Amino acid sequence: MVKPDLSVEIGTVKLKNPVMTASGTFGYGEEFLPFYDISRLGGIVSKGLSPLPREGNPPVRIVETPAGMLNTIGLQNVGVDAFIEEKLPPLRERGTTVVANVFGETVREYAEVCSKLDSAEGLAAIELNVSCPNVKHGGMIFGNDPTALAEVTRACRAVTRLPLWVKLSPNVTDITETARAAEAEGADALSLVNTFLGMAIDVERRRPVLTRISGGLSGPAIRPMAVWMTWQVHQSVKIPLVGMGGIVEATDALEFILAGASAVQVGTSNFVHPDAAIRVLEGLETYLARKDIGSIRELVGSLETRVEV
Ligand SMILES: Cc1cc2nc3c(=O)[nH]c(=O)nc-3n(C[C@H](O)[C@H](O)[C@H](O)COP(=O)(O)O)c2cc1C
């Protein structure tokens, strides 16, 4: 039997398969090496990188919730320089496809990190995390305002030739507005979605569970909303999409692919099963073989919405 073709293209980025791991849930890949060969994945996305190292927020910064978790890690990371010098070379030698996730508190910080990554060897793309407060504008979140999102996308586009993926926030009224703003400024692809804002309360202590009060909700709890947003954005832009939000199994990944995503990322599920992404990959292979589908690309955006008669 001929093996199904799992390779996909996100613009100019060729991936051996559509299964990646999501930023912040897979570190820089090292911790997962005892579990499987991470170069089997379509790619990995680094933890969000800033100009300088950051320690993140004080604990408590993670809490389990029904079908998911809330986190307020606070963008802890090694900083872009240490990433380029220490984390990237072993991944490159291993043949792992790496996308660098980037954030900043100002447009200038975003551009500074992108400019440094531009000259790093062995990166497939940059993914902009725009779910960050803009300190120059009173803490407004970049990704919640199409104008601010356009500005940060434009500034990063100007300093790098690497493919630029903009990762959309779901905490907006109409996600197609921010999607179109990023596309208009030259984004090569859109990743969606980041976490949904939420909070949990300890009723015994009458205190928020998380030290920073609110956090980002992820995991299966958000999947239907993330799939719906993927479908909406697919109908609004021409650039490729990378879908995520609560993917645990291959069928979850297929929901995003049918809704229009060319690739997917597995996030919170890595905390439950370190080999979650490989399980998703193997499940996709089985699905294609069972359905006698030659290439996963045939499925992208192929959702049938006409009423059956
Ligand atoms: C602990 C944790 C840390 C995260 N850190 C980042 C980050 O640094 N940058 C980013 O763009 N998204 C970050 N995310 C969001 C995930 O990449 C992903 O968009 C989100 O969790 C939805 O996918 P999931 O339900 O599969 O986890 C983080 C999520 C979690 C749970």
Image: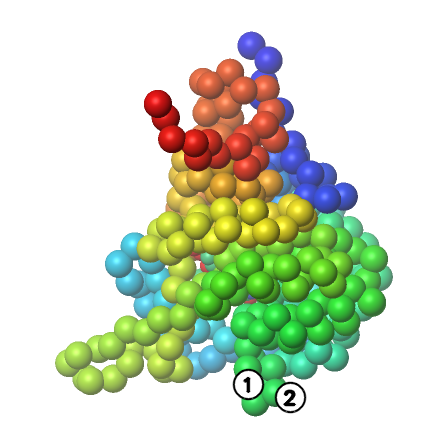
The picture places residue 170, in percent across and down from the top left corner, at 48, 63
Classify 10 Å Cα crowding around label 1: few (below 14), some (14-19), many (20 and above): few
Residue 303 vs residue 190, the one in the foreground? 303
Instruction: Find the distance from the CA under tag 1 to the CA under tag 2.
Output: 7 Å
Residue 19 vs residue 183, the one in the foreground? 183
Q: Residue furthest top?
A: 1
User: Which residue type carries mark 1?
Assistant: Gly
Rendered view: 2 above or below 184? above
Would you say the residues marked 1 and 2 are in contact, meaning their CB atoms lie under 8 Å apart? Answer: no
Rendered view: 243 above or below 72? above
Which residue is labeled 1 in the image? 139
Q: Is disc 1 placed on a helix, strand or loop? A: loop
Classify 10 Å Cα crowding around label 2: few (below 14), some (14-19), many (20 and above): few
Residue 84 in sight in this render: no
Task: Tell me if 167 is positioned left or right of 244 in this view.
Answer: right
The picture places residue 97, in percent across and down from the top left corner, at 68, 46
Task: Tell me if 34 is positioned left or right of 66 in this view.
Answer: right
- Quadrant containing the N terminus is top right
The quarter of the picture where residue 225 lies is bottom left
The picture places residue 215, in percent across and down from the top left corner, at 40, 73
Q: Is disc 2 placed on a helix, strand or loop? A: helix
Q: Residue at x 50, y 63 (%)?
A: 174
Q: Residue at x 50, y 57 (%)?
A: 193
Which residue is labeled 2 in the image? 136
Residue 15 in sight in this render: yes
